[in-house]
Amino acid sequence: MPIGLSIRRVVAILLLVLASIVARPASAATGTPLGVCILPAASDESPAALFAHPDRFDCISRQTDHGGGDYWALSQPLSTATPPQALLRQASLWQQRTTLYVLYADGAIRHTGYTSATAGRHLMLGAIIQLALPPHHARPVRLLWHIEGSLNRRGILIGPTIVAPSTAARTEVEMAALYAAFAGMCLSLLIYNLALWAALRQAFQPAYCLMVLCLLGYAFTSSGLLGQLTDIDNNDRQRLNYVLLAWSAAAAMVFARAFLERRVFDGWLRPYSNAVVAFLLLATGSYALFAPRFADITDPLSTTGYVLVLTWLVPVLVRAWRRRSNYLWVFALAWGAPVALAGVRVLAAFNFIGWQLWIDNSTLLAMALEAALSSLGVAYRIRLLSLERDEAREQEIAARLLAATDPLTGLLNRRAFLDDAIGRTQDHQLVLIDIDHFKSINETIGHDGGDEVLRVIARALRSSASPEALVARVGGEEFAMLAPADRPLDAGAVLDALRRERMPFDLTVTASIGTCIGPMTREVDWKAMYRCADRALFEAKAAGRDRVRNGIARAA
């Protein structure tokens, strides 16, 4: 598949994904959002008493100001239009147990809930917990949550929303389309680049594939699909999700280092890159391993790791610009959106921005965009590599031609002639041509004139040779021609062609020719052939020059 076509398909998939998000930016939260108030839990409290005294709840402070622990959360009064079969959707957070109490219009209280171990039964795509309100003939009027073991790094209860079953089903289909499009894009990029790596063996390709694999793993855990398909503890799912996000960021850094030229990372930037990757992986690994213990330390440290990744980009871009990287523009284009959205995620992690579904999924969207645009960069890089290889191949061919060619006449030189001649299986005819009195020619018209005579002789030999014959300059004024014995050259016709050539200053120039026929299988055969043709050439000169003599031919 052509690179351009594959990239266009990838970008088209990405645009469809982004279009679905833009069209419904909060589709997973479509419904009636609920405001909640918070109360730290005590051991002697009952749901009925808490429903009766809503004034005890804190509705002003931010949830994260309360720290980790056990809490009660009370919703605002529900709309009178809320049907008994309504569904409750809320963000999945680090909690040990959540119990939902529903107060109905007739005063009845019903409850449902889940633990971290059983949350997968209620987990929807987008890592949304969905609970059906307990069945009752009266309408629900208020909700009360008892949340135990809340880590409360992002909140105690985030995004509670009342939705109709039809809305929830439509939202699930939309999220399935989103994640399926992302997974399909990643798989196509993965297969495509693995195939390219098998052919090109470029270091940035396995790094790119590693990044895409990590993104797939992150999407698999962050989407909630892992919880739906397995009985994994929801808190453990979040640990794994945390680690895979860090691995995705680290793999992206490794890819960037392999993609940009080595000179961009010369000096201190290379060890600094290693330090940032190590810090990010160590901090997130510590959070995943030790949470909820030490979360007050490991969570800010892991967020700081992402801050370091963002700050690492600054010297990288500056270096790439100063050192005139060929790939700076595509790198900056690919990383623009991920950097911006990663900054938003960092602000949300430090609780400067409240929770939003699109923020929660911004990493997925940003890395999807980065992966797709990086594929453009990979295609561009491969295009440059192909141009470089074509140029190198042309230079190699030119170098070989120069190494095999006599620079004055353009004919084969002695070495190239012998390389091509020795080893032929059938008998061949060797023709040696030597210019008569060439020393006196140089003395008469100078060396420049003598060089021009050599060029004229070479042109005549080339024009009189058959297509399969070899023509070479094997000495100062000595030339050789080699042709198959079953299609021999007419040495007399060659001599006539030399006589017809107009020489510099209308000088009369003659040549003597000696021929011989024999095998060319080995070097010893060449030496024997050369001696035979050279004796014939000597006989031609002894007989008065400007003539042809044939050596004793040997039957094939």
Image (cartoon, rainbow, N blue to C red):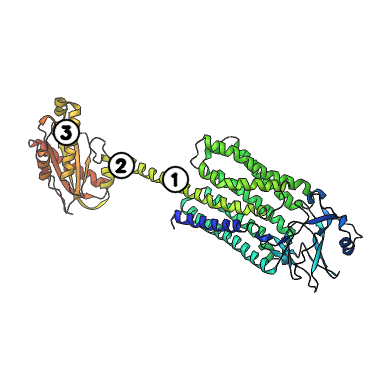
Residue at mark 3: 453
Viewer-proximal residue among 371 and 270: 371
Residue furthest right as drawn: 44
Residue at mark 2: 401
Amino acid on which the number 3 mark rests in the picture: Val
Secondary structure of the residue carrying tag 2 is: helix
Amino acid on which the number 2 mark rests in the picture: Leu
| Quadrant housing the N terminus | bottom left
Identify the disc placed on residue 222. none
Where is residue 426 drawn, in percent x and y?
Answer: 22, 54
Q: Earlier in the sequence, mark 1 or mark 3?
A: 1
Amino acid on which the number 1 mark rests in the picture: Leu
- For disc 2, the neighbor class at 10 Å (few under 14, some 14 to 19, many from 20) is some
Viewer-proximal residue among 542 and 142: 142
Taking the spot 67% from the left edge, 66% from the top edge, the residue there is: 167
Taking the spot 60% from the left edge, 51% from the top edge, the residue there is: 366
Identify the disc placed on residue 384. 1
Kindly check if marks 2 and 1 are in contact, taking CB atoms under 8 A apart as contact: no
Q: Quadrant of residue 34?
A: bottom right
| Quadrant housing the C terminus | bottom left
Q: CA distance from mark 3 to mark 2?
A: 23 Å
Taking the spot 51% from the left edge, 45% from the top edge, the residue there is: 330
Mark 2 vs mark 1, foreground winner is: 1
Kindly check if marks 1 and 3 are in contact, taking CB atoms under 8 A apart as contact: no
Q: Is residue 20 visible?
A: yes
Kindly check if marks 3 and 2 are in contact, taking CB atoms under 8 A apart as contact: no
Q: CA distance from mark 2 to mark 1?
A: 25 Å
